[in-house]
Image: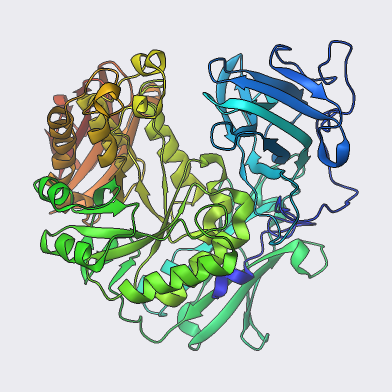
Amino acid sequence: MTYRKTVCFTLLAGMIGCLALLAAPARTQAAEKMFGTNLSFEEAADNGMPSHWGGDRNFFSADKGAGRNGTVALRQNADGEHYRLCSQKLDVTPGTRLEFSAYVRTDDPENCRPMIAVEWTAGGKWLGGSYSQKCVEEEGAESDGWTKVGNVVTVPAEADHVTLLCYVFKGGKGTAWFDDCLVKEVLTSPYSAITSDHYRHVADGKDRGGELTIRVGVARSSAVASPRDVAAPLVITDQRGTEVMTLEPAAFGDDYIDYIVPAGELTPGKYTAKLTMPGAEDDQRQSISLRFTRVEEYPERYAYIDQYRRLIVDGEPFFPLGCYFGGVSEKDLAIYADSAFNCLMPYASISREDLDRCQASNIKVIYSVKDNFRTLAVNSEQEGIDRTRQTVEKLKDHPAIIAWYINDELPLTMLRELTDRRDLLEELDPTRPAWVVLYQVNDVRSYIPTFDVIGTDPYPISDNPASYAGQRAVTTNRAVFGLHALWQVPQIFDWASYKKTDEEKKALRPPTLEEMRGMFWMHIAAGANGLVAYSWSDLWRMDKTVAEGGRAYVREPFEERWAEVKTAAAEVAEFFPVLLSIDPAMDARVSDEQSAKDTLVRLYGHEGKTWMLIVNMLDKNQTVPFEADEAAGAEVQLGGKLVSFEDGKGSVELEAFQPCFVVLTPKK
């Protein structure tokens, strides 16, 4: 494995050392804080329910002798029609990182899926939650029919009410049992992450003035009010462990410390940068470290991320604009190729012949090896490694492949395996990046060692406004300090495709063209360097009603929906030259405080002008004032109406969710 095996996100028990994988044996630590009462359900109330738990007694009860080792378990009888929850309020401070888990079993694994979750609200409004996935237990462990499920999550700072839930997945039918729940605080370091401004932390000592910036994230808490509170010298050592330089902090952000490594002064080789808590003993539990490499010249790479976070393919900048697929049939490819999309991400393990057809159609492929984990399609970690190795070694010479897709929303409890898998992909194919997609937006920073490129997949329509996608993209970009490439996943599908009953399906709808367009451009304005929409397959599924073998309550004709998706994609592709430009841009900004909150803005320099991308996040029209002191003139492209511009000040009128480029001409 490579340098990432040595990344240490720890203080005391720490981010990797103390981020106890749910599969690991329990450890007794004096500082460990537990939450919840009667989590093993041994105490029963007179009404037959476990004490301190709330739930419908028609569905939930304490079942004596049904638990692990003959103890008491929580029993749920799910009838497939009524969605019922058994809950308990947790006294958790917002911002706390939690590990939660439970053992579950069922008499009908095909139709009854027991779950555990932590959800939170603010002011009575539901804000979100974290939902259990199967935990990676030690191979060969006896289960006696019980499965451990759980997750790790950070409770958002705005939450004021946190709840633990046991339930059967909506629509599930059968009997389920829950036992030995656990909710505990994960003790984390104030050093939340460490990364650099160079792709895979490799520097040639010449670009960017010969400097490599190492950024250390700092998690604020009651004990840490500012990054300055935990600032200390960064020590650089060579492969022999000899100290070669010590660096003082170069800059501070709201939640990070920057150190500037003069890479040009180092001889080629591998180095370790280590930051240790002020006044702490010099050991891994109280430090954070990162390995980086100094090379004489960058190696030849077919696809990589450059210093501007652009994907470079065969020497040329490339903006990935694609869709998720299942397989890739000739019929689908013929339809798809007649669009502005330039890549796709198939879930299926497509053949070399499929790759040939994609390449012939000028369609690149992000190739999936995401299922090679014990919680998914393989029986052991080694089998997953072997399958990944076989696939990559067989196909890595194919020019259609521009990246590897290695993780689709797997939990943080698998941090070690996910990190190892990224390292394995770099070892097997150093010439292509590894992309992951997460819904766990609040935990993206903790996943940094597991990817080269990150994406998140907010799908707001129709329960939330389209602006939700933009807000999530902003959170994602901040989580990676703006240093990692973002290939975001916009919604083009209808959630009704995943619902079972007519009542559920009728309550949902697909995004409109205006919402899709807005979400595409919100992702870009928030920092995205690529878009891979979800999903082509769902457009087809909704082309037929359930009675016709599809998933729609009311048919959504593919031709109409695809035409709208094509339109949104074509508008992005039209501006590829701008989105891929690295020319300098003049300073420009939205000048009204409220408008700045209701829009997303990104600046590009192109052909001597500044292109100011402004996207309206509101579902209504708004007039947005802006300032550009160095500009002599302004015009608009893509959308919007220029209301006025004089003496460096102007305004533009935008419709709901509308994007607009304000093109600014500099003064002579």
Name the one closer to the observer, 178 or 317.
Answer: 178
Residue 69, horizontal then vertical, whole percent: 86, 42
Which is more toward the observer, 90 or 106?
106
Q: Is residue 486 above or below residue 113?
A: below
Q: Residue 68: percent from the left, percent from the top? A: 82, 40
Quadrant assignment, res 225? top right
> Which quarter of the image is occupied by the N terminus?
bottom right
Is residue 173 placed above or below 82 in the rendered structure?
A: below
Q: How is the image coloured?
A: rainbow
Note whether 27 is above or below 646 in the view shown: below
Residue 230 x, y percent position in the rendering: 71, 55
- Which residue is pictured at 69% across the width and 37% down the height? 105
Give the quarter of the image for residue 142: bottom right
Q: Nearer the viewer, residue 46 or 471?
A: 46
Give x and y (percent) for residue 502: 37, 15
Out of 251 and 371, give the one closest to the viewer.
371
Q: In the image, 537: left or right of 151?
A: left
Observer able to see residue 215:
no
| Count of numbered tags | 0
- The answer to whether residue 157 is left or right of residue 343 is right
Q: Going by the picture, which residue comes out furthest to the front?
A: 107
As drawn, is 610 to the left or to the right of 29? left
Q: Do we see residue 72 in this rendering?
A: yes
Q: Residue at x 70, y 45 (%)?
A: 148
Question: Residue at left 41%, top 67%?
Answer: 199
